[in-house]
Image (spheres, rainbow, N blue to C red):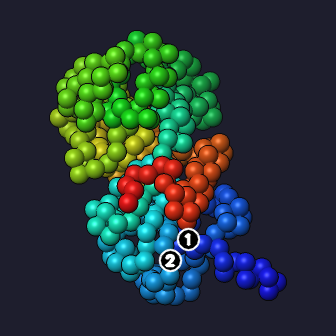
Amino acid sequence: MENQEVAAKLLPKVLILEPPGVFTAFETEFSQKFECLRAWESPIPTDEFLDAHARSVEAMLVSGFTPITSSVLHRVPSLRCIVTTSVGLDHMDLQECRRREIAVANAGNVFSEDVADLAVALLIDVLRRITAADRFVRGEIWPIKGEYPLGSKLGGKRVGIVGLGSIGLDVAKRLEAFGCILSYNSRKKKPSVPFPFYSNACELAANCEVLVICCALTEETHHMINYEVLSALGKEGVVVNIARGGIIDEKELVRCLVQGDIAGAGLDVFENEPEVPRELFGLANVVLSPHRAVFTEESFRDAFELILGNFEAFFSNKPLLSPVMDV
């Protein structure tokens, strides 16, 4: 027992405010490599916990649901590395990280395929009314009403992808196989991409029947999908969002769906999670998912290996494996 305690004290320390799902899934393996400072288990308030480790901890593990604000960073002046289990970085004050010379790594591309799979699944579900049809059968409505309403074909649909990073490209690859006609909006045109480029989301929507949101949430993209964009998409249009809820003006989306200004939506993310607008619950043309696009056994294992590799690189003074900001 004494030898185990000595060994634990020699392990590099990693601060964890709240346990990410990837950490929970591989906690035993992670704890064999690092001494985990578990703020969520501490009987003292988080601020006091941070103060207690202010001068000793250099690395932190966070999820996309844990805000890393300037006030949090101020309490841990010894911090030199943050690894987040998410791809998105809207939960972190990157400007403050840069000012404090804190290296940041994210999940890189390990979730891209799984997120792209769910994006296509949501789109097919909305167009073919799969979830609504399931309720139709389970509710024993079929024997009473008989035929179920027609769905809509995916092949040949004009699909606009907002954000053509690794996830957007994987979505494009999948939809291309279905025979969809693709175009995209991104921060800048990509010379190697053959699809038509639109410089803003409104122009893209006007030339599409489906919008798939794959971009990061930033000050520039917040509420980028607004009433003007939704109106341009039109009454036959469908929105799929597997990025961040705040990219869409949710109040306008709800209003357009309720009033029939667009045809449907597949949503894995929401603006004020876990709160979801109740108006959406009764709509048969809307498919809802609780921010689970990355949640597969395979992606969690890949993410764990990447997280482990990032921390091992940091503590060995080597370059991070998936740096967002290296110092």
> Which residue is located at x 41 percent, y 15 percent?
180
- In which quadrant will I find the N terminus? bottom right
Asked where in the image residue 6 lies, by quadrant, the reply is bottom right
Q: Nearer the viewer, residue 5 or 26?
A: 5
Place of residue 184 in the rendered image (x, y in percent of width and height, measured from the top left) = 30, 26
Q: Please report whichever mark, 2 or 1, sits nearer to the chain's N-terminal start.
A: 1
Asked where in the image residue 4 lies, by quadrant, the reply is bottom right
Q: Residues within 10 Å of mark 2 (few under 14, many from 20)?
A: many
Would residue 247 be seen by someone viewing this image from the given angle?
A: yes
Would residue 237 be seen by someone viewing this image from the given angle?
A: no
Q: Any mark on residue 14, and which? A: 1
Place of residue 12 in the rendered image (x, y in percent of width and height, measured from the top left) = 60, 72
Q: Nearer the viewer, residue 283 or 93?
A: 93
Q: Nearer the viewer, residue 36 or 146?
A: 36
Asked whether the residues under the numbered discs 2 and 1 touch, taking CB atoms below 8 Å apart as contact, a structural biologist would say yes
> Which residue is located at x 74 percent, y 83 percent?
5
Pointer 2 residue: 57
